[in-house]
Amino acid sequence: MFANACSLARQFTFPIIISHRSYNGQCGSGIGTFVIINEEGWFVTAFHIIEQLNKLGLANTEYTNLVSKRKDIEDKEDLKKHVKMQMLNNCKIQPSSITNFSVWLGWDGLSIDGQIHAIPQADIAVGKLKNFKKEMVKTYPKFKNPNDPMEQGTSLCKLGFPFHSIEPTFDDHKGFVLPPGSLPIPIFPIDGIYTRTVNIQSNGAKPYPLMFIETSTPGLRGQSGGPTFDVNGAIWAIQSQTHHLKLGFGDNQKNSKEVEHLKNQYLNVGWGTHSLTVTSFLTENNIPFQIF
């Protein structure tokens, strides 16, 4: 059912890899998804991915400032040794301090150009790629026109990069190095149906509603920021999060082992930022996009 739509969506759906290195030398990374929406290099993703990048940036700044502070103390020749040691002990570098971090955006040489625009409560963010060339993407997406009917029960598909992990290493000259076989990251679809629309109160912060589209299947880790689209490839939502709805099956008067089993039965549903919220936000920021 979604073969043609997936073939279309793969052309504008890409992985984002955020790598980090701690003071103790340990390296790690996380994988998300982003969608390039026009030939100017504008992209859309989930805000929580950008938030993680921002947190790493702040942690790295704290580390850099601490290193500078310690150097200033060490360079003070007029301090007695015990005083200097006390001051250095008061500003120790923790093993988990972030010494380095980076973001890889589907191609070598691409970076985020300028400011990210975001609506945190709707978990949506848009930015522009630096060094992007329009030839990199053969087909750009079209968003579902939110003024057209969006029927409950419509089959939808999510696309992204789950079930894949990368353990980078760090080289002082090359920076982060991905192990052989890491790329290309396999892309993975999962289908479901449109179950509900979830409205969020914005307290008048925006002149348009903040909403999520709910689907009957979860958004998988690694699919955050990716498209939720119909059989025509039109984007209905940008995947954001998964919610766990308690089913409430069973009889609590049964034996304790079965009761405990029944307590852990849930329906996992996906939430994606609604196309009305996404397209309104793009319009607010004068970012060109296409409507289906």
Image (spheres, helix red, strand yellow):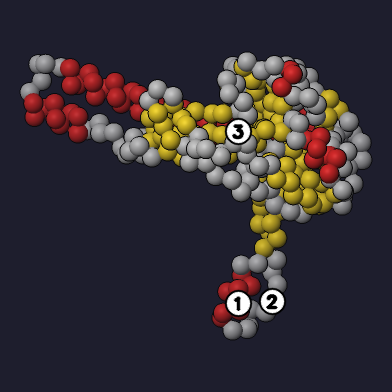
Q: Residue furthest front?
A: 180
Label 1 or label 3, whichever lies nearer to me, is: 3
Q: Which residue is located at x 29 percent, y 33 percent? A: 93
Q: Nearer the viewer, residue 94 or 285?
A: 94
Instruction: Tell me the kind of residue under disc 2.
Output: Gly
| Inter-mark Cα distance, 3 to 2 | 42 Å
Q: Read off the residue under disc 2.
A: 250
Between 267 and 198, the one nearer to me in the picture: 267
As measured in the structure, the alpha-carbon distance from the residue carrying label 1 to the one carrying label 3 is 42 Å
Say which quarter of the image contains residue 108: top right
Where residue 38 sits, quadrant-wise, is top right
Tell me the element at label 3.
strand
CB contact under 8 Å: marks 2 and 1: yes
Q: Which mark is residue 259?
A: 1
Q: Is residue 56 above or below residue 167?
A: above
Horizontal side, residue 179 vs residue 170: left or right: right
Left or right for 199, reference 90: right
Which dot marks residue 16? 3
Vertical arrangement, residue 112 with respect to residue 219, above or below: above
Instruction: State if disc 3 and disc 1 touch (CB < 8 Å).
Output: no
Residue shown at 61% from the left, 70% from the top: 263
Residue found at the very far right of the displayed protein: 149
Q: Secondary structure at mark 1?
A: helix
Q: Residue 65 placed where, x, y %?
A: 33, 23
